[in-house]
Image (cartoon, helix red, strand yellow):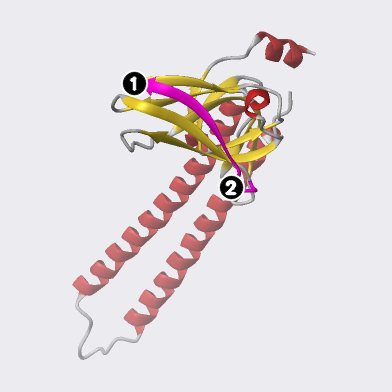
Amino acid sequence: MTVSLLNNGAGTAAAAGAGANITGNGASATSDMFTKLLVAQIKNQDPLSPTDPAQFVQQLTQLSQTESLQNLASLTSANASVLQSMQVLALGAQVGADVMAETGTLSTDGVTKVSGQMTLGATSTTTRVVLTGADGGKHYVNLGTTAAGTVPFAIDPTALGLPAGSYSMTVETSTKENPPVDLQGRLNSVRLAASGSVVLNIGNIGEVAPTAITAFNGKSTASATQSSL
């Protein structure tokens, strides 16, 4: 079982800490500069027409508010990094498990059957899943009449004559409803992209965001045996 970048959680947190320190140093430099400007302003004010002390108090208040906002931004950024690392670790523990994910594509080896489901808002007298290959060729999984609610189906590449490859997937219904489709696949890996986002690789689907996951179905016997080797 391989989990990409799981060991980088500490590194991510350390990077977040470094970012927080940099922001903190920036806030300190801003405070020092403001203080120097304020002192210079007091020293060089016109003795015959001194500045209203209320203005100095107002400026100090503005400085305090600015520092508070900078500290809050730094804390929020650090917390986001920590939460992201925790998400990677939590999802990493599920590597090897079967999951359901919302997708508009199918990646097939041309042999393995794939389970899926959709949820219809109304009964459809003619329902089918349409798979479109890179060459524009279409393949249909005819489901006939389907009642409102969850509709399970299976894609058999051998029966459909689907060569290995990627296919776009849509649903056609007599009610013109186009529901999202969930496919089942094995969670193969979890990684952090260069942009900092979490990316999951799921068998039968490919790479998706964590928000695409709709269900965790646990590890099958085969998956558990393979993970223990």
User: Could you say which is closer to the camera, residue 140 or residue 207?
Assistant: 140
Question: Percent x, y for residue 132?
Answer: 57, 42
User: Could you say which is closer to the camera, residue 44 or residue 170?
Assistant: 170
| Distance (Cα) linking label 1 and label 2 | 37 Å
Name which quarter of the figure residue 33 lies in: bottom left
Mark 1, other Cα within 10 Å: few <14 / some 14–19 / many ≥20 = few
> Residue visible at 61% across and 43% down?
137
Q: Main secondary structure of the magenta part?
A: strand
Residue at which label 1 appears: 149
User: Could you say which is closer to the camera, residue 146 or residue 84?
Assistant: 146
What's under tag 2, amino acid-wise?
Answer: Gly
Q: Quadrant of the C terminus?
A: top right
Residue at which label 2 appears: 196
Q: Marks 1 and 2: which is nearer the front?
A: 1
> Residue visible at 50% across and 55% down?
24
Question: Percent x, y for residue 81?
Answer: 53, 42
Question: Percent x, y for residue 155?
Answer: 58, 25
Q: Is residue 25 left or right of residue 179?
A: right
Extreme right residue here? 229
What's under tag 1, amino acid-wise?
Answer: Gly
Residue 85: mark in rendering: none
Give the mark nearer the N terminus: 1 vs 2.
Answer: 1
Residue range corresponding to the magenta coloring: 134-146
